[in-house]
Image (spheres, grey):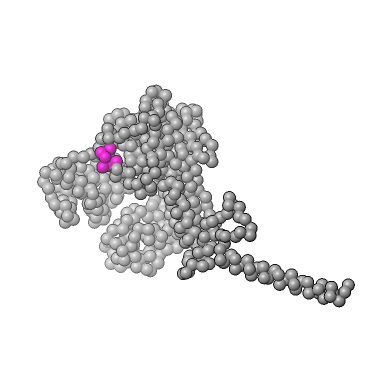
Amino acid sequence: MTKYNKRFFIYQPIFFALILIIGIYIGSKLASVSSFNNNIFPINLNKYNKITDVINYIEQDYVDSVNRKKLTEESIIGMLKELDPHSQYIPAEEFNEVNDQLLGNFEGIGIQFRIEKDTITVINTILGGPSEKSGIKAGDRIVKINDTLFAGIKIKNKDAVKKLKGKRGTKVKVSIFRRGVNELINFNIIRDVIPTYSLDIAYIINDSIGYIKLNKFSATTYDEFIKALKELKQKGMTKLILDLRGNIGGYLQSAIKIADEFLEDKKLIVYTEGYSRPKNFAYATEKGCFEKNELIVLIDEESASASEIIAGAIQDNDRGLIVGRRSFGKGLVQEQLNFPDGSALRLTVARYHTPTGRCIQKSYENGIEDYYMEFYNRYSNGELENADSIHFDDSLKYITPEGNVVYGGGGIMPDIYVPIEKDIKLKYYNQLINKGLIFRYAFEYTDKNRDQLSTYKTFENFNKDFIISDLIFNDFLNFAEENSVEKENKGIKYANERIKILLKAFIGRNLLDDKGFYPIYHKVDKTFQKAVELL
């Protein structure tokens, strides 16, 4: 080996190291100029992630500092807006709030409350929950939470929920104002699992007709429903009114299991299909316990998704009557993808179809805002007052096994249409309703007379013995006048009975929850009354 070769051999590693360092330096400079325009190595555009590159570029070279997490989340939200109204991104901090209602429970202190005069006011304690066990009562005002003032500070409902909810086993201190007690009362409450119920009420209307109202379809809905159904049958129920008005949906499987109770073996309930999802059929089984009895399902413009699955299955199988107004029109199925940081994505993956094959998803071509404003369009075009204002596309016509015509393309149209009531003589009454004055007066009356009203332990006792006296009624009229609704003698006389019924119903709810409300309210519920008449 020559002297030159020996010297090169010694310095060769240093030479290669210098080349490597220079290469890395040049590469970094090229990347900082543009991570998009690399002509040296061609990019596979099918696998190229432009969004990541854009976010990297912004984070690296933008004129001001940026929040990468916020940029990423806003990008996701922007993408979903281009898809459909029901694909949704759920940030980690909102996940529990969104998810708890569908799980059928949450962790907290176990109270029903409302913000009254800028104070958290306890309406009821959950039976067996931490608050009831601690001694908190209906009517108590929560003034402080963990020694921090929470009254008179313009508190919002979601802020109160965040402070009172928490993991099971954790403690929260609340300071309570109670009528008749001069000083605040302190309670140290240990949070626990609190059940949430999707069944508002189940009761026997008369010797043969039963009534069940569901407010959502959660993980526990079927169990709640089947328990109530069996209890009503034991009391002699042979005909059922299932009320799904205002029920915006929830778990698909819960709706399928409830529909199964009404349909004979092998009857199609629903099927789903998407671009990347093959057809998936759900059929009734032989286990149904209410397959032969008379059935009416109540729906309205807020009945959506899982509610429409049940209504569509009953209607398309000619199994019972659908009564009310046209449903919302949500025929899209979402699946949830959970992320490691606690956030989630609910993506629409399929459409569901009723047994005749119709998809009842309404159009969302004009954007999300127009999609959710469609209720007001129904109101302005007269649909809520007259079924003849509804025009269906003949190309979306379907025929049931018994020859009845049904339509797809925008909600479930009921068999028996019950319009909203429009009566010029009810102007005074409608003012009371729209301003929430009957509800507010009932709350204040209950709050002031809680000791006297506490003698009504059961609905039967309350319904029989409590009456809206002339003294109470006149006091309410004065209350309404103090709140900008002037007395109008003809209007008062015309709506006298309705006002008294609603006052009693809301007082009943404050005392006995929904079982003290619905049986009274149903006296002025035209859709309910029509269903009873039909049965």
Instruction: Determine which quarter of the picture holds residue 23.
Output: bottom right
Q: Position of residue 71 (x, y in %)?
A: 48, 61
Residue at 16% x, 46% y: name it.
Answer: 428
Viewer-proximal residue, 183 or 295? 295
Quadrant in which the C terminus appears: top left
Q: Position of residue 533 (x, y in %)?
A: 27, 30
Instruction: Determine which quarter of the picture holds residue 209.
Output: top left
- In the figure, 222 relative to 46: above or below? above
* Span shown in magenta: 378-383
Residue at 42% x, 58% y: name it.
Answer: 165
Q: Is residue 446 shown left or right of residue 68?
A: left
Is any part of residue 226 visible from this angle? no
Q: Position of residue 45 (x, y in %)?
A: 58, 52
- In the figure, 182 relative to 194: above or below? below
Instruction: Determine which quarter of the picture holds residue 192.
Output: bottom left
Viewer-proximal residue, 348 or 178? 348
Viewer-proximal residue, 338 or 515? 338
